[in-house]
Every structure is written in C-alpha cells, then in structure tokens.
Image: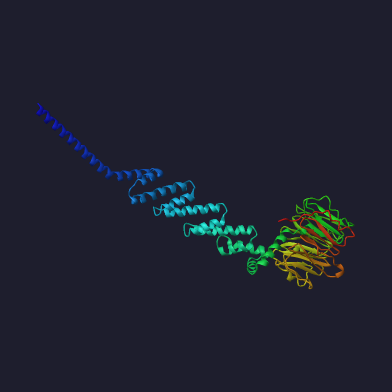
Amino acid sequence: MEQNQTINLRAAVMGMLLAATLVFAAAVYGGIRLRQELPRWRIERVEAAINAGDTAAARQRIERLDDDTQRSLYLPQCDYIDGKTLLEAGDTVSARAAFAAAGDYLDASDMVKQCDYASAEALYSRGDWTGALEAFRALGAYADAADRCSDCRYRMAESAADSGSWEEAAAIFSELGDYADARERLTEIARSVTGLSDGQEALAAFNGMGRENVELNLRMNTRRAQLSQESIAVGFYHTVGLAADGTALACGDNSYGQCDVAGESNLKAVAAGAYHTLLLRADGTVRAVGRNEEGQCETAAWRDVVTVAASNYASFGLTADGHVLCAGFGDFAEVESWSGIAQLAGGSYNLAGLRADGTVWVWPSLPGSEVLNGAARVAVNSGFAAAVLPDGSLCCTAPGLPEGQGLVSLSVSGTCVLALDADGQILPHFFRAGDAYDLSAVRDAVAVAAGGTHSAVVYADGSTAVFGRTEEGQGNTAAWRLKVNED
C-alpha cells in the first residue's frame, strides 16, 4: 500500500515537474516571440497614427522605437503632416519650420519655398514693398518670384512718386525698363519736373538735372499748381478780384460802371480792360460791365468759355475747343482763326495765345516772338511780349529784362514786367525809374497783376495788396479774401 502511494506521489511530482517545465518552456518561447514581434508591432502602431494624421500620438510612439534609423524615417513624416496642417490654417511661419524639419522628405524643400512665397505675398498685401521685395528675392527662380520682385519695385516707385520723391521714383522706373508701363511713368515724371510737354525732350532735360535743379523745378511746379492768376485783374484805375465764395469784388474808378460786379455768383475767373470788367461764369457764359463804346461788353452770346482776357478796349474768351471769341476794338479776323490755344493773355491793344504744342501766337504780330515758344506762361503789352519758360527763366521779345530763375508766372503792362518766383516773391522790372514802387516785402504770393499805374498781388491766404497809384480807391482791398488754388 505504502509502496503504491510512493509510486503515485512520484508520478504526481514528475507530472508537476513536466508541466512546470512545459509552462516555463512556453513562457521562454513566448518571451522570445514577443521580443521578436514587438518592434514590428510598434512600427505598425506608429504607421497607424501617421495614417490617421495623429502626429502627436505618432511622435509618442516613435520615441519608443529602439532603432534611430526608424525614428529618423518617421519623424520627418510627422513634420511634413504638421506643415501641411499649419499651412492650411494660414500659419506660414510655423508651417515653414515644420517643412524645414522634414528635410528631404517628399517635396518638403519645395513646400518651404511655398511658405516663403506666401509670407512674401502677405507682406505685399500689407503694402510692405521693401519687406516683400527682400522675401521674393530670397526665393530666386521659384515660381514667378522674379516678376514679383519687379512688381514690388514698381510699387515702391509709385509710392515715392506719390510722396514727391521724384528722383527716387525716376531711378526705380528707369531700372525697371520695359516692365509694365515703367517707361511711360518715367516720362510722366520727367514732364512733371521739367514742365516740357515733349516726352523725349523732357527725359533728356531731366537726365541732365542735378539734385538742386530738380528740387527747384519741383518747387516751381508746386507753386504753378497754386497759381491763381484768374482771381485778380487791374484796369487803368480799378481792381477786380474773384472772391473765395465765387462772387466778384471790385474797387476804384467806376465812371463807366466797371466796378458794378455785384449780383454774380459761382464765377470762375475775372479780367479787366482799361475801363471794363469781364466775369466768367461756371456755365461758360461771360458777363461784361463798364465802358462799351467799342463793343467790348458784347459778350452775351458767348458760350463754352473756359478763360477770359482783355486788352484796353477789347474782350477775349477762350473756348473749350481752343478757339478765341473776340469783342471790341480791333480787327479780329486773324485771332478768330486761331486754334489749339491753351492760354490767353491780353494787354493794351494786344493779345497772346499759348498753344497746346508750346508755340506762342501774338496779335498784332511782333518781331522776335519765336523766342517765346515753349513758354509755361505768357504775357503781352504794346510793342513787346514776355514769357516764363518751363525751366523758370524769363524771355522777352524786347531786350533789357533782367535774368531770373525759379520763375513761375508773370504779368506785364506798359510800365513794368512783374515775374513771380517759386517762393512767392516778385522780380520787378520797371521801364522808367519814376514808375517804380517797392515790391521787396512780397512773400508767398500766388498771383500778380501788373497795371500801368498800379499792380495787385494775391497771397496764399487769399489776401490782396495793391502797389502804386491808389487815389481812385483801387487799393481798397484790405478786406478781400480771394479764391486761391490749393492743389
């Protein structure tokens, strides 16, 4: 019995040992298999997270990989996916960093440039032309970056021109060559600075200018834009002004009713003859008051007039199509055949017309008037005519006038030539010393009207001063505030 129990016990123990051995062997085998399969399982889990776009989980699982090579394989994929997501969200800066971290994976390097391009576009959209230019330049030959560089420079030139930095704008437009309308814009600047209408002549003159001359021309152009010559006029013994509210003002001798200008509004210009006054209405019609013995006030039928002028006993109107209307003393057959006129100037028994092509026609004709061609402003009186040229110099059909520079306008009479410069000062020339009066205190003037016995000046604030003879009350302008151009 005991022997049987012993045998059975031994058999049980042996069975347990065998079972334990089998379990241990299975455990060892399972451990070996697990160690063999674990890297594959980890990779599968990394790839599953990447395929799902869950880069955060993928990065955590990548950290558990034992193989550096595998980590370097999957991390760029996460960076690339993050870059795509950030780019779609508009965060180009972070997207660029992610694509840069992705290195050579797929087209990551091109995506870096795409981010840089988008950043350059953002700078461009904000008007940061300099920043955008630098960004597009850094892109080299990518996409249309080279063209966008030219576009940025074009915008920089436009901005410089808008701010009055003409030299900077011209330099950039010149460098741009045939890009867009750069050549046309350069020509526009040359015309604006030089005052010359011919593009080639303007470019040649502009290219030969130094900085000092460019600045002087710009000052002249600014002052020319502010000129208010049509706001002031003088007759023999009366003064007429166009008020800021569009009405007319007059003072002085009124023996012919030449100062009866009340009742008119919305006026554009005034002019004065010896004893009559012209008022140009905004609708292109003209009212004339004062002496009419010579028919100089017969202007009721005039239409489409854009500016007016007067000689002693005649009236003239320039129509929108460049023709001249005439009334009063004189044979106007020649004048009425004129065309292409852009500016009129009357004086004594004479008329001058500055044509759109820069040529000057004078009636009655004057010898040597060809020297006036190319004028910016023209003036005329008996026996002579004078002009201010675009370069600011003064020329005249008669000798003896002083040289000047920086001049923008002028007015003449039988006794004097008064030229206005870019600083609003008067350069006077009196033919006889006994007719002279002191104009040295004049500053910031925007218009001057020369008369035989008195002259008037309009200042930038619209105030008016009269110099010379004032016995007839033609100097009673202290309360006047005339219309001035502010552009």
User: Residue 44, percent across and down?
Assistant: 33, 44
Residue that lies at the very extreme toward the front in this rendered image: 2
Check the image and tell me how it is coloured: rainbow
**What residue is at 79 percent from the left and 73 percent from the top?**
400
Comparing 261 with 285, the one in front is 261
- Quarter occupied by residue 471: bottom right
Count the numbered circles shown.
0
Comparing 476 with 180, the one in front is 476
Q: If the image is split into quadrants, where does the C terminus sit?
A: bottom right
User: Residue 11, percent across and down?
Assistant: 13, 32
User: Residue 265, percent across and down?
Assistant: 79, 50
- Quarter occupied by residue 337: bottom right
Could one spot residue 103 in this view of the protein? Answer: yes
As drawn, is 335 to the left or to the right of 36? right
Could one spot residue 299 in this view of the protein? Answer: no
Q: If the image is split into quadrants, where does the N terminus sit?
A: top left
Residue 173, relative to residue 57: is it above or below? below
As drawn, is 168 to the left or to the right of 369? left
**What residue is at 64 percent from the left and 61 percent from the top?**
165
**What residue is at 15 percent from the left and 31 percent from the top?**
12
- Quarter occupied by residue 391: bottom right
Comparing 306 with 218, the one in front is 218
As drawn, is 11 to the left or to the right of 65? left
User: Residue 125, percent across and down?
Assistant: 55, 52
